[in-house]
């Protein structure tokens, strides 16, 4: 789901971009980093997930059951379109562009105006195109925003439950990979220079990017409440079921005492 969500978002941005007057503003090297996050690092993060005993309560699936279930489709489509929607707004909304225009925000966060030298901070094929798209600060901000929002979505797809921290400490590799992506992304932007077409961002700019990208978590929680397992009541009921494994025998304990008697 994690990979398919990013693929859907990227495809949508590339498709609608020409109609809205912009191209997908990531360079080939930046796209290689996106692919590394989407494939290699994601595999390391999700590969260590422990077995979820709640799956033992589910009935066997028919042989002709689709690999991608309806729940997975809802997650992929809704989160993919949300990432695409936020990315398009990031690239086209003047208010967001102004947040990363240091000529406007210099009074709030003073910076060295030498950073505005396009030729020194970000060498691209056409300096004029870089100016039209928003400058090196804005393009660096979008690069980081896209990585951050996709990485935060990893918390949504790792569990269908409302409690995103469920069993997370049993997969310390997930937390390590999550933090590694953020550290590397900030490092790339701060020292990447012309190789990655990035410039250093201020603390205020990093804070704005994190706040904007983390919105995908409450968005997906709302989706789960409204559309998964009969709403919030169904989700809480599923999470309230306790599975206990002892002596090779599985005993399922429900909140309903009548059903417990039948199971015993």
Image (cartoon, rainbow, N blue to C red):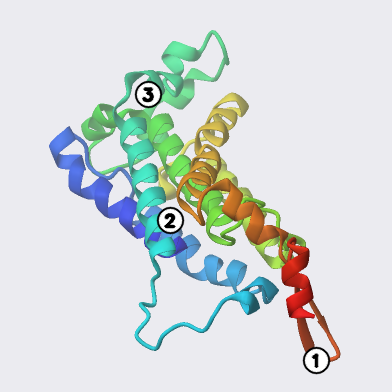
Task: In this rendered view, identify the residue nearer to me: 109 or 229.
Answer: 229
Task: In this rendered view, identify the residue nearer to me: 162 or 258.
Answer: 258
Task: From the image, tell me which residue sits under label 1.
Answer: 248
Mark 3–mark 2 distance (CA, rounded to whole Å): 29 Å
Question: Foreground mark, 3 or 2?
Answer: 2
Q: Is residue 12 left or right of residue 107?
A: left
Q: Is residue 243 visible?
A: no
Task: From the image, tell me which residue sits under label 2.
Answer: 75
Q: Is residue 29 above or below residue 134?
A: below
Q: Is residue 125 visible?
A: yes
Callout 1 secondary element: loop
First of labels 1, 3 by sequence position: 3
First of labels 2, 1 by sequence position: 2
Task: In this rendered view, identify the residue nearer to me: 229 or 103.
Answer: 229
What residue lies at 58% left-to-right and 44% top-to-bottom?
186
Question: In which image quadrant can residue 101 be found?
Answer: top left
Mark 1–mark 3 distance (CA, rounded to whole Å): 59 Å
Q: Is residue 98 left or right of residue 12?
A: right
Task: From the image, tell me which residue sits under label 3.
Answer: 97
What residue lies at 69% left-to-right and 60% top-to-bottom?
176
For the N terminus, the image quarter is bottom left
* Circle 1 residues within 10 Å: few <14, some 14–19, many ≥20: few
């Amino acid at each position: 789901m994690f990979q398919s969500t990013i693929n859907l978002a990227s495809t949508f941005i590339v498709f609608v971009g020409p109609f809205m007057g912009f191209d997908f503003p990531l360079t080939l090297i930046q796209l290689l980093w996106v692919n590394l996050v989407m494939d290699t690092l994601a595999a390391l993060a999700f590969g260590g997930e422990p077995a979820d005993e709640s799956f033992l309560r589910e009935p066997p699936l028919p042989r002709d059951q689709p690999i991608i279930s309806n729940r997975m489709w809802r997650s992929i489509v809704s989160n993919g379109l949300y990432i695409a929607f936020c990315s398009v707004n990031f690239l086209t909304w003047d208010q967001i562009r102004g947040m990363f225009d240091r000529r406007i925000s210099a009074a709030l966060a003073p910076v060295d105006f030498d950073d505005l030298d396009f030729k020194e901070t970000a060498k691209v094929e056409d300096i004029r195109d870089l100016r039209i798209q928003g400058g090196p600060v804005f393009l660096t901000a979008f690069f980081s925003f896209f990585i951050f929002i996709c990485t935060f979505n990893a918390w949504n797809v790792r569990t269908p439950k409302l409690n995103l921290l469920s069993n997370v400490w049993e997969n310390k590799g997930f937390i390590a990979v999550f933090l590694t992506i953020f550290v590397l992304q900030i490092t790339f932007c701060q020292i990447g220079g012309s190789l990655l077409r990035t410039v250093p961002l201020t603390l205020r700019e990093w804070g704005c990017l994190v706040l904007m990208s983390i919105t995908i978590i409450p968005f997906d929680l709302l989706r789960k409440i409204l559309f998964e397992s009969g709403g919030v009541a169904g989700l809480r009921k599923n999470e309230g079921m306790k599975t206990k494994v002892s002596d090779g025998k599985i005993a399922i304990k429900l909140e309903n005492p009548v059903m417990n008697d039948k199971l015993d």
